[in-house]
Structures are given as structure tokens and as C-alpha cells.
Image (cartoon, rainbow, N blue to C red):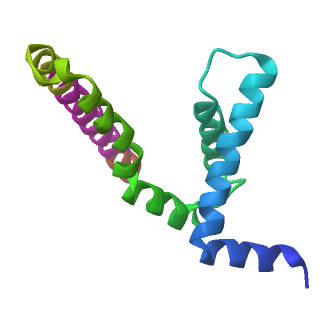
Amino acid sequence: MSALPKVARLVRRSTLLQVGIVIAFWLAGEALVRMFAAPLPGGMVGLLFLLLLLATRQLSALSIRRGAEWLLADMLLFFMPVALAVLDHREFLGLVGLKILFVILISTAAVMLVTAFAVDRCYRWRAGHVLAEADPR
């Protein structure tokens, strides 16, 4: 029996190994960016490569699902340094902070509205194509 199915089964059961896979892609992206002196974030390059492997089904989503869910569940911990930085810059607690908060809220609302519009349009487009394929007239 090949060792590959055993490894795949082990990875699918281990959250720690899955987090390690995601981190390995991040580090590989960092290495590529530094090697080629690309003006891109290494994490983005690594995760785009991971997305490419998932989209082409070279890598199963089950191989990283638990690890990705764990990372997303603890996402607040990644923003803790930002929250502490606000305490170092008291000007963010005044008018400047209100202006920044306003920009953040407006931009977040804009992104949410555009995303909702795009999802709605794609859903309607797909529903129209599914109905057209079902009705062969």
C-alpha cells in the first residue's frame, strides 16, 4: 500500500498539519518574492499559488479546511498589534480618529454593497443559464 493515502488521511485529520501547510505556502511566497525582488506581499503570492492548486483540484480543500477554519476563528489575535498601536497614538482617539473611522465605515459599506450586487448579478446570471439549459426549446 502506498504511503500517499496514509499521509493524506493524516493531514485531513490534523489541524496542526493543515495550519503548517498554509504557513508553508506563505513562506514559499515570501521566498519567491525575495528571490525575484517582486513588489508584492509574499503572503499574497503564496496564497494565490494555494488558490491556484485548489482551483485546478491539484490540492483537496479537505487538506486545509480545518487549519483554515482555525486560523479564521482566531483572526482577532492577528489584529491585536493594531489595537495596541492605537494606544501609542493618542491622536487617533480625537478628531483624526473619527475621520479615519468614518473612512473605514464608508469603505467597508461600499465593499459590502458592491460584493452583494456582484453576487446577486452572478446568481441571477447563473439561474438564467440553468433555466435555459433545462428548457431545450
Would residue 29 be seen by someone viewing this image from the given angle?
yes
* Residue occupying the point 60% across, 40% down: 47
Residue sitting farthest toward the right? 1
Quadrant the C terminus occupies? top left
Q: Nearer the viewer, residue 110 or 132?
A: 110
Q: Magenta includes 135?
A: no
Q: Nearer the viewer, residue 82 or 27?
A: 82
Image quadrant where residue 49 sits: top right
What is the count of numbered marks? 0
Left or right, residue 21 beside residue 110: right
Say if 127 sits above or below 40 in the image.
Answer: below
Identify the main secondary structure in magenta. helix
Relative image position of residue 91 (x, y in whole percent): 18, 17
* Residue occupying the point 34% across, 34% down: 82
Left or right, residue 88 beside residue 70: left
Image quadrant where residue 126 sits: top left
* Residue occupying the point 13% across, 15% down: 99
Stretch in magenta: 106-129
Q: Nearer the viewer, residue 5 or 41?
A: 41
Left or right, residue 70 beside residue 31: left
Relative image position of residue 111 (x, y in whole percent): 25, 28
Q: Magenta includes 119?
A: yes
Would residue 63 be seen by someone viewing this image from the given angle?
no
